[in-house]
């Protein structure tokens, strides 16, 4: 077994923003192609309402997602996701100038993409009976050592620097390294204000001190202004 299933937790669903990106967004955010992933074991951490895992498995990619939201039922998450899409759209409408409108041409197009991700994610949860969606609260992952070829992490590290401290970031990256054989990709490398994560250089220095290669790499995706680079850690 590559994964361990923990018992249900009392985490409140109201404290979670359940939002997701699509397969196409993931390929751009992480500068990947489908051919690079086919046949490999991939962890999406945290997966949220993203449709990456659902689509990846249709292409012969052994993808799993982990998130604290997965302690709840697909029905609960579906309702929560719809509410959160409208909430986020209303918030973004007030700060349009902080976004790049290249990939998305309008708020309606953005809403449609988020709905697509949510619907595909929830449908896959139901069809797979949750097998691919692992409930866990970071920085602890319910996976055995070196279970995955690659771990992808979007829109948690390092965006929530105001809510998650340096130790959380470091412990989460340590845990990702533990469960990953080849490489980790983290997107983006900025905080919510569009500034470089304050402790990014310290994280990079720590990774290098462990004998691993790490680079900040530009990617062909930018929605939040300045969110166009990822951190790539080579674990081998």
Image (cartoon, rainbow, N blue to C red):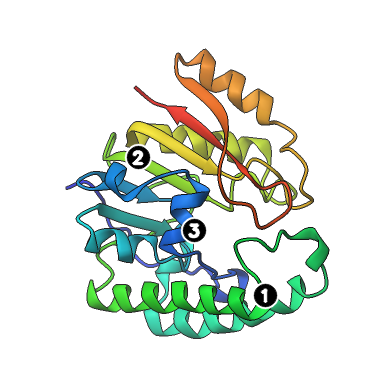
Q: Where is residue 43 in the image (x, y as percent from the top left)?
A: 35, 49
Q: First in sequence, mark 3 or 2: give its number.
A: 3
The residue that label 2 is drawn on is 150
Would residue 46 be visible to someone looking at this image? no
Mark 3 → mark 1, Cα distance in angstroms: 16 Å
User: Callout 1: helix, strand or loop?
Assistant: loop
Q: Nearer the viewer, residue 149 or 147?
A: 149
Would residue 168 be visible to someone looking at this image? yes
The residue that label 1 is drawn on is 106
Quarter assignment of residue 24: bottom left
Location of the C terminus (image quadrant): top left
Q: Position of residue 20 (x, y in %)?
A: 51, 67
Q: Which residue is drawn at 83% across and 73% down?
A: 94
Q: Which residue is drawn at 74% across and 71% down?
A: 92
User: Callout 3: helix, strand or loop?
Assistant: helix
Q: Which of marks 3 and 1 is in front?
A: 1
Q: Which residue is drawn at 33% across and 79% down?
A: 123
Residue 111 horizontal side relative to residue 136, left or right: right
Q: First in sequence, mark 3 or 1: give its number.
A: 3
Q: Residue at x 63, y 81 (%)?
A: 108
Residue 45 horizontal side relative to residue 54, left or right: right
**Mark 2: few/some/many CA within 10 Å (<14, 14-19, 20+):** many
Mark 2 → mark 1, Cα distance in angstroms: 33 Å
The residue that label 3 is drawn on is 25
Q: Which of marks 3 and 2 is in front?
A: 3
Quarter assignment of residue 58: bottom left
Quick check: 210 above or below 102? above
């Amino acid at each position: 077994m590559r994964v361990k299933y923990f018992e249900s937790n009392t985490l409140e669903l109201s404290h979670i923003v359940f939002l997701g990106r699509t397969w196409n967004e993931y390929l751009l955010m992480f500068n990947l192609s489908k051919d690079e992933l086919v046949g490999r074991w991939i962890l999406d951490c945290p997966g949220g309402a993203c449709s990456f895992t659902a689509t990846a498995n249709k292409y012969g990619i052994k993808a799993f997602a982990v998130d604290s939201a997965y302690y709840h039922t697909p029905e609960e998450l579906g309702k929560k996701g719809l509410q959160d899409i409208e909430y986020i759209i209303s918030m973004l409408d007030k700060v349009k100038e902080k976004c790049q409108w290249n990939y998305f041409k309008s708020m309606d197009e953005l809403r449609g993409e988020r709905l697509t991700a949510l619907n595909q994610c929830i449908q896959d949860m139901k069809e797979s009976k949750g097998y691919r969606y692992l409930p866990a609260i970071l920085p602890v992952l319910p996976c055995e050592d070196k279970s995955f070829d690659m771990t992808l992490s979007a829109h948690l590290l390092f965006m929530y620097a105001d809510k998650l401290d340096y130790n959380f970031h470091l412990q989460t990256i340590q845990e990702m390294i533990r469960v990953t054989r080849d490489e980790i990709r983290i997107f983006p490398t900025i905080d919510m204000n569009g500034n470089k994560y304050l402790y990014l250089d310290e994280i990079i220095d720590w990774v290098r001190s462990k004998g691993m290669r790490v680079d900040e790499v530009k990617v062909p995706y930018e929605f939040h202004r300045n969110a166009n680079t990822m951190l790539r850690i080579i674990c081998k």
